[in-house]
Image (cartoon, rainbow, N blue to C red):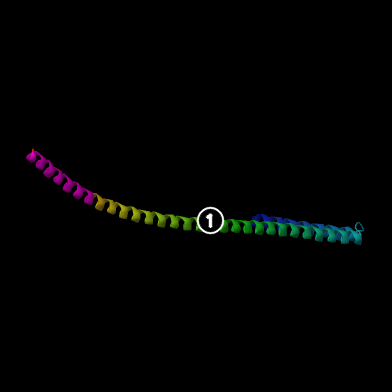
Amino acid sequence: MEEYEIIETAATHGANWMMILSMVMNFIFGGTTLFGLIKWRSERKLRDIDQKKEEKNLDVQNFDALVKQIEYQEELLEKYIVNKKKSEELEDERDRLIIEMKRNQTNLELEKISLQKKLTIAESLVCKNSQCKERQS
């Protein structure tokens, strides 16, 4: 892009010098009036002003696009932070539930052992009672 601008600038300056030389020659030989020179100079200034306005507008548009991109990146970052916090909360909840599940499993195992002991005692008593009944008969 810079090479194009350099070539365009060189061509513009070359054309300007050719135009100036042509106007000087016309003025010397009576073909151009002083009003024509003033008009040409003012038109050239207006073209330069318009070109600078266009460049400024492009710069403003680029800046606006950059600001929007930064705002979008900030939104994404905020969403990431919120999602990360939720993820950590869910992991903490999962860990808490796993600990509770293991505790309940241990309690169930203890209760199972207790019930097996009671069942064993009950079965041994039933056998003794039935043996007693057989003896009584």
Q: Which residue is drawn at 11% across and 44% down?
A: 128
The quadrant the N terminus occupies is bottom right
Please name whichever residue, 10 or 104, is drawn nearer the observer in this view of the structure. 104
Q: Residue at x 37, y 54 (%)?
A: 97
How many residues crowd mark 1 within 10 Å: few (<14), some (14–19), many (20+)?
few
Q: Quadrant of residue 21?
A: bottom right
State whether residue 125 is above or below residue 39. above
What are the residue bounds of the magenta stretch?
A: 113-136
Q: Which quarter shows the C terminus? A: top left
Is 3 displayed left or right of 88 in the figure? right
Which quadrant holds residue 54? bottom right
Disc 1 residue type (three-letter): Lys
- Residue, far top: 137
Kindly tell me whether residue 130 is visible in this rendering. Answer: yes
Q: Position of residue 53 (x, y in %)?
A: 75, 59
Percent coordinates x, y for residue 75 in the rendering: 57, 57
Q: Nearer the viewer, residue 7 or 120?
A: 120
Please indicate, yes or no, whether residue 13 appears anywhere in the rendered image: no
Judged by its main secondary structure, the magenta piece is helix
From the image, tell me which residue sits under label 1.
79
Residue 107: image quadrant is bottom left
What residue is at 41 percent from the left and 55 percent from the top?
93
Residue located 91% across and 62% down the image: 34
